[in-house]
Image: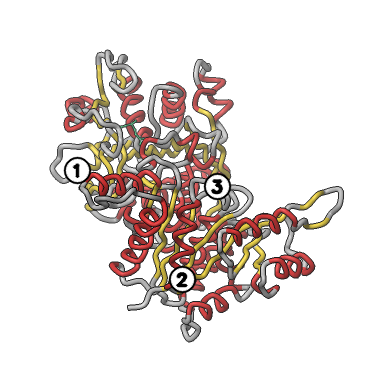
């Protein structure tokens, strides 16, 4: 079987949305029935993202198979509406440990091991192997970082070499600045960047341009001239209202048909039903809709929005599923510490729903507990994700069950009531990388519970990433005081879902946001938004 490749690089700076471009191309391929998957190359020497701070690197995305990967994988899965596997994530760390492993096993005996040919040959072999084993028509390769970086240079070189024997289409994403005083789109930075790319032996077939305003025809022409392309191959990526609009924006410029032609798939017909479904979602997001809910996310990494990328997207999908619009605020949990109930009311009173997402370490914990208490005592909707579920249990123990010194051993190893404690099989673990409870785990759900209502089933599976868990020794005491334990691992050892008995608040040990997609919103998020909308409606009637 012949496989084709699309390699996506980025120029000038990071943060232009290369992941969204890659995801959009994936979506287009899927719409035309061209079997595609993405590979992401990240130049850093970490083996995976599991040991990185979300403040530095954004959200750590977890796959079904336990892989802790770059947040771009979240967008790949959301656009594709499919689960992908962690062998698609190639980091500098994985790459070099593989090469050094080979060297130690004597596979290069007698040779000095070099970037060219050993690293580049290995990369070509890996990329071709993925396309072959997954029987792909097209493998998309997103090269992390910026063209000209040292970190990704050998990867770009490997892709150049790949193009000598295989069909490879290069797509470059760039930025077109505009000086306010001149009011003119400036192509010079991109001209320079293209020179760098071409020096590396890469001739892009398409140049996708981020800019503040739509591309002017003179900008297109100038860039076409400098890049040996036709003006129609210079693609406008400006003014999208939301990330999900990009596939449609690319289609409106015939990018889909030009790319399919380039790859030899020009005969493919588009799946109209799937396209309409996507369009409906994109149009909904741009609309002023009737029903509303005000949501506060109270977390410890809110200063960098990327830390909670999947939470934000899952809320969007859930809003769509409820035909509702949400007003979303991000609140730094430390700001809720040392405050009087009146002050907390002033900060949180206007919200219909409060969400506490995942997190690690002590900072900001008491602020989150204050927010949860406020939500419980004031009949707000509540959704707790992983840490948010653990703190929901601690808050309940302290304030609704008189176990005053309740805590997690993560925050206070000497607490009298360790409502949350290190998981049994974590006790002997010393290594930090890839050793949490990771990936997809099944959960058994109690009939009649909120979770049951949300999932419509007694069985579900969600992704996890944690070391601590609900301490089962407190199950009876907390249940007697009204906490509902509605989800367990099938062997009953791990408490997975807890609820307030007012049917407004639920917490899960999992990260359901990781599996939420426009075409498949996460059930607990859907339930949360539904509850928040109802609360908002009631408050308006009152
Ligand atoms: N820090 C907690 C634990 O390790 C929660 C983790 C999370 O929210 N992902 O169990």
Answer with mark 2 or mark 3, whichever residue precedes in sequence: 3
Farthest-out residue, left: 491
Q: Quarter of the image containing the C terminus?
A: top right
> Which residue position holds label 3?
149
Q: In percent of the image, x 53 and y 54: which residue is there?
A: 324
Q: Quadrant of residue 253?
A: bottom right
Q: Is mark 3 within 8 Å of ligand 1?
A: no
What is the number of the mark on residue 299? none
Q: Looking at the image, is mark 1 or mark 2 nearer the viewer? A: 2
Q: Position of residue 350 (x, y in %)?
A: 57, 35
> Which residue position holds label 1?
489
Let me know if residue 428 appears in the view. yes
Q: In percent of the image, x 68 and y 75: which residue is there?
A: 230
Q: Looking at the image, is mark 3 or mark 1 nearer the viewer? A: 3
Q: Position of residue 325 (x, y in %)?
A: 56, 52
Q: Is residue 19 above or below residue 281?
A: above
> Which residue position holds label 2?
164
Q: Looking at this view, is 10 or 344 the one in front? A: 10
**SS for tag 1?**
loop
Answer with mark 1 or mark 2, whichever residue precedes in sequence: 2
Q: Looking at this view, is 16 or 205 the one in front? A: 205
């Amino acid at each position: 079987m012949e496989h084709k490749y699309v390699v996506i690089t980025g120029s000038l700076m990071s943060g232009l949305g290369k992941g969204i471009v890659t995801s959009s191309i994936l979506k287009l391929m899927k719409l035309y029935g061209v079997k595609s998957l993405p590979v992401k190359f990240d130049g850093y020497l970490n083996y995976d993202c599991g040991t990185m701070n979300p403040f530095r690197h954004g959200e750590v995305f977890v796959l079904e198979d336990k892989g802790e990967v770059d947040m771009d994988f979240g967008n790949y899965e959301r656009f594709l509406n499919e689960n992908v596997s962690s062998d698609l994530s190639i980091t500098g760390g994985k790459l070099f440990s593989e090469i050094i492993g080979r060297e130690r096993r004597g596979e290069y005996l007698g040779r000095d091991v070099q970037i060219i040919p050993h690293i580049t040959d290995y990369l070509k072999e890996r990329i071709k192997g993925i396309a072959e084993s997954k029987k792909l028509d097209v493998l998309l390769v997103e090269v992390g970082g910026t063209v000209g970086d040292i970190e990704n240079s050998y990867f770009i070189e490997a892709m150049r070499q790949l193009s000598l024997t295989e069909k490879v289409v290069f797509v470059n994403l760039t930025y077109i600045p505009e000086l306010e005083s001149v009011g003119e789109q400036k192509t010079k930075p991109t001209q320079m960047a293209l020179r760098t790319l071409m020096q590396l032996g890469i001739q892009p077939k398409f140049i996708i341009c981020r800019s503040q305003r739509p591309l002017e025809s003179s900008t297109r022409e100038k860039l076409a001239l400098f890049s040996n392309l036709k003006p129609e191959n210079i693609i406008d990526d400006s003014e999208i209202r939301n990330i999900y609009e990009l596939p449609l924006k690319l289609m409106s410029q015939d990018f889909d048909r030009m790319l399919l032609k380039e790859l030899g798939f020009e005969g493919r017909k588009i799946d109209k039903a799937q396209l309409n479904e996507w369009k409906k979602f994109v149009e909904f997001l741009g609309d002023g809709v009737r029903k509303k809910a005000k949501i506060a996310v109270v977390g410890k990494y809110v200063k960098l929005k990327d830390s909670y990328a999947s939470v934000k997207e899952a809320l969007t999908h859930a809003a769509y599923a409820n035909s509702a619009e949400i007003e979303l605020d991000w609140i730094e949990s430390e700001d809720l510490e040392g405050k009087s109930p009146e002050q907390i009311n002033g900060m949180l009173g206007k919200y219909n729903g409060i969400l506490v997402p995942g997190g690690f370490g002590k900072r900001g914990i008491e602020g989150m507990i204050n927010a949860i208490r406020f939500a419980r005592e004031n009949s707000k909707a509540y959704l707790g994700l992983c840490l948010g579920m653990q703190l929901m249990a601690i808050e309940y123990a302290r304030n609704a069950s008189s176990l005053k010194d309740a805590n997690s051993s993560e925050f206070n190893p000497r607490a009298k009531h360790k409502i949350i404690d290190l998981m049994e099989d974590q006790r002997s673990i010393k290594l930090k990388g890839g050793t949490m409870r990771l990936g997809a785990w099944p959960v058994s759900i109690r009939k009649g519970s909120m979770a049951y209502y949300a999932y419509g089933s007694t069985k579900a599976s969600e992704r996890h990433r944690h070391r601590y868990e609900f301490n089962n020794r407190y199950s009876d005491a907390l249940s007697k005081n009204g906490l509902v334990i509605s989800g367990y691992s099938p062997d009953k050892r791990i408490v997975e879902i807890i609820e307030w008995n007012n049917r407004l608040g639920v917490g899960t040990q999992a990260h359901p946001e990781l599996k939420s997609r426009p075409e498949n919103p996460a059930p607990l998020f859907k339930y949360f938004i539904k509850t928040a909308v109802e609360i908002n409606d009631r408050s308006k009637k009152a």
